[in-house]
């Protein structure tokens, strides 16, 4: 039996997580459901989202392509309420400015930046109406990255895109200070299929050596876990964070402090 007196509860809230079928998104969906929310698992991979919603109960799969205004509009039309939006969907790219082709740069910006803009804009009316159903305002949590805070070699396009997500977070927070809370989580390197795909694509011949390097650049000496990021999202979406907006919550094992 759930104890609704516990902190960080989200009972009665409706949440949507983009890229919710895997990695940090999947962990976030599970954590928000555990907190009592009903969660829309918004993902371009509908079968994977459907498999996840079957296992959870208070969740429903929703096809959503963050690069398509039409797809986003169709998804938004299916919702009557939304209290929490987690902009998690994103892609990566490896390369300096010299080897980053215009099409690579455009692809990163299209998913990581324009996607956040399109999704937020489409669901904004529902989020602003959240206060009509609850005592607190709606919340947006953007999954940014330490890559938006510090320069990382061979990550020109990715750093640029995540820096933009941080700027959007702050701008929205000051645009809607009394009607919406907007914050970002900035993870370091987290053990996800995203990272495994990077290792397989770019470091197939020295995967374990590169994995050790990824661990070492975070002073705690390990990669983050998706569940740790999800816990931060839950906090930022909860009433306990009612005074938190325009903030960046960094989970990076001490990377940006070193």
Image: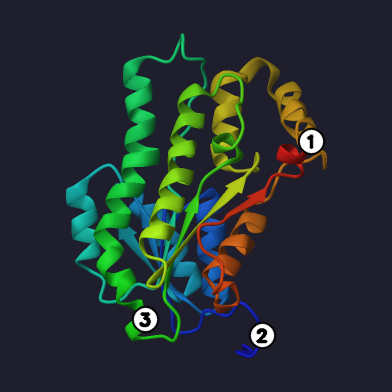
- Asked if 48 appears above or below 5 in the picture, the reply is above
Residue 22 image offset from top left, x and y in percent: 50, 50
Number of numbered markers = 3
Residue 236 image offset from top left, x and y in percent: 56, 66
Left or right of residue 235, residue 61 in this image: left
Quadrant of the image for the N terminus?
bottom right
Residue lying at 47% horizontally and 53% vertically, measured from the top left: 142
Q: CA distance from mark 1 to mark 2?
A: 35 Å
Q: What residue is disc 2 on?
A: 6
Q: Dot 2: what SS?
A: loop
Q: CA distance from mark 2 to mark 3?
A: 22 Å
Residue 110 image offset from top left, x and y in percent: 32, 35
> Which label sits in the foreground, 1 or 2?
1
Residue lying at 29% horizontally and 64% vertically, measured from the top left: 124
- Asked if 168 appears above or below 15 in the picture, the reply is above
Residue lying furthest top: 98
Please tell me how crowded label 1 is: few (under 14), some (14-19), or many (20+) other residues with Cα within 10 Å. Answer: few
Please tell me how crowded label 2 is: few (under 14), some (14-19), or many (20+) other residues with Cα within 10 Å. Answer: few
Q: Which mark is residue 258?
A: 1
**Dots 1, 2 in contact, CB < 8 A:** no
Q: Earlier in the sequence, mark 1 or mark 3?
A: 3
Residue lying at 40% horizontally and 39% vertically, measured from the top left: 112
- Asked if 66 appears above or below 63 in the picture, the reply is above
Q: Which mark is residue 71?
A: none
Residue lying at 45% horizontally and 55% vertically, measured from the top left: 20
Q: What residue is disc 3 on?
A: 131
Does the image show residue 64?
no
Left or right of residue 101, residue 33 in this image: right
């Amino acid at each position: 039996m759930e104890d609704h007196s516990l902190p960080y509860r989200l009972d009665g809230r409706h949440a949507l997580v983009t890229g919710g079928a895997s990695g940090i998104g999947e962990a976030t969906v599970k954590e928000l459901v555990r907190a009592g929310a009903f969660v829309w698992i918004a993902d371009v991979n509908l079968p994977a989202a459907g498999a996840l919603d079957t296992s959870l109960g208070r969740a429903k799969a929703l096809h959503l392509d963050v690069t398509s205004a039409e797809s986003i509009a169709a998804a938004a039309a299916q919702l009557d309420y939304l209290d929490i939006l987690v902009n998690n969907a994103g892609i990566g790219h490896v390369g300096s400015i010299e080897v980053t082709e215009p099409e690579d740069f455009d692809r990163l910006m299209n998913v990581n930046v324009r996607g956040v803009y399109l999704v937020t804009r489409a669901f904004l009316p529902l989020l602003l109406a959240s206060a009509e159903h609850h005592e607190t305002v709606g919340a947006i949590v953007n999954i940014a990255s330490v890559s938006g805070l510090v320069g990382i070699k061979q990550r020109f396009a990715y750093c640029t895109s995540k820096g933009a997500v941080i700027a959007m977070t702050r701008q929205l927070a000051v645009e809607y200070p009394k009607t919406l809370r907007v914050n970002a989580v900035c993870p370091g390197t987290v053990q996800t299929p995203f990272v495994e795909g990077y290792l397989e694509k770019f470091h197939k011949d020295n995967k374990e050596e590169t994995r050790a390097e990824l661990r070492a650049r975070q002073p705690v000496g390990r990669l983050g876990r998706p569940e740790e990021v999800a816990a931060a999202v839950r906090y930022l979406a909860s009433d306990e964070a009612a005074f938190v907006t325009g903030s960046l919550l960094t989970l990076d094992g001490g990377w940006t402090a070193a």
